[in-house]
Image: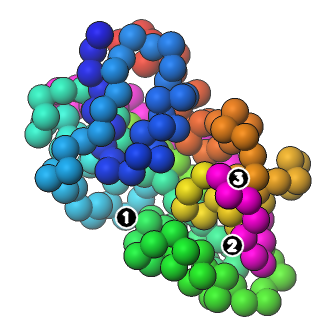
């Protein structure tokens, strides 16, 4: 079985990717803790490509990376590529976002994800993206997921990501859509 290094230290992302890529003949593993990749890209695509390439070169293995975040219309797309750095913890990030939105009526937002796969030499061989549109609630709901999931509401489902089952979230999420777009090409590698 081939190894695919997931360019993250986030166990939640690893679990999501394992579920979404189940059935493939690849063993997924987290990147080494000591390997830090600075996200210097101005876009989700630049950051995903940068992380995949650097992790592949450093480990000598195939690597997959995603860069994803939340874009809120009323905040001119913020937090965007800075979503993970909007606070030190999920609670701080949610609190900051809700504070900045205040009583704003326009709560439209979208989760965006770009996934890139690099060969062991660092060359990017695949890239795909996914978007999930929704709204930001005034207060968190649900206990599942991670990050902004408790305040990201998907109107068609009448649920936040944090209220959905794993299967529901995988089918609808930005990361799920990006990985589904990547799967046919990935299976051909």
Which element is circle 3 on? Answer: helix
In the rendered image, the residue lying farthest to the front is 143
Task: Identify residue for label 1.
Answer: 42
The residue located at (45%, 72%) in the rendering is 89
Q: Nearest to the eye among marks 2 and 3: give it.
A: 3
| 98 lies left or right of 78 | right
| Side of 180 relative to 57 (left or right) | right
Q: Quadrant of the image for the C terminus?
A: top left
Residue 76 seen in render: yes
Q: Is residue 44 above or below residue 184?
A: below
Residue position marked by numbered label 3 in the rendering:
161
130 in magenta? yes
Name the N-terminal-most of marks 3 and 1. Answer: 1
Number of callouts in the render? Answer: 3
Q: How crowded is mark 3: few (under 14 residues within 10 Å), some or many (20 or more)?
A: many
Magenta span of residues: 117-144
Residue 69, position as x, y percentages in the image: 52, 59
Relative to 153, 2 lies left or right: left
* Residue 152: percent from left, percent from top: 71, 62
Give the quarter of the figure containing the N terminus.
top left
Residue depicted at x 48% and y 37%: 15
Q: How dense is the environment of label 1, judged by Cα within 10 Å: few (below 14), some, or many (20 and up)?
A: few
Cα gap from disc 1 to disc 2, whole angstroms = 18 Å
Front-most of residues 156 and 148: 148
Mark 2 in CB contact with mark 3 (< 8 angstroms): no
- Coloring basis for residues: rainbow
First along the sequence among labels 2 and 3: 2
Mark 2: few/some/many CA within 10 Å (<14, 14-19, 20+)? some
Mark number displayed over residue 73: 2
């Amino acid at each position: 079985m081939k190894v695919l290094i997931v360019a993250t230290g986030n166990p939640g992302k690893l679990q999501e990717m394992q579920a979404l890529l189940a059935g493939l003949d690849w063993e997924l593993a987290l990147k080494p803790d000591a390997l830090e990749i600075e996200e210097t890209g101005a876009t989700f695509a630049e950051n995903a490509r940068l992380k995949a390439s650097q992790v592949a070169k450093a480990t000598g293995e195939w690597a997959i990376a995603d860069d994803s975040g939340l874009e809120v219309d009323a905040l001119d797309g913020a937090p965007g590529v800075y979503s993970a750095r909007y606070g030190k913890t999920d609670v701080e990030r949610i609190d900051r976002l809700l504070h900045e939105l205040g009583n704003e009526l326009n709560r439209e937002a979208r989760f965006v994800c770009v996934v890139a796969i690099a060969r062991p030499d660092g060359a990017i061989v695949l890239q795909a993206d996914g978007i999930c549109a929704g709204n930001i609630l005034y207060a968190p709901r649900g206990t599942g997921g991670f990050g902004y999931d408790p305040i990201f509401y998907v109107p068609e489902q009448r649920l936040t990501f944090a209220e959905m089952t794993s299967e529901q979230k995988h089918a609808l999420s930005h990361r799920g859509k990006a990985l589904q777009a990547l799967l046919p090409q990935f299976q051909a590698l």
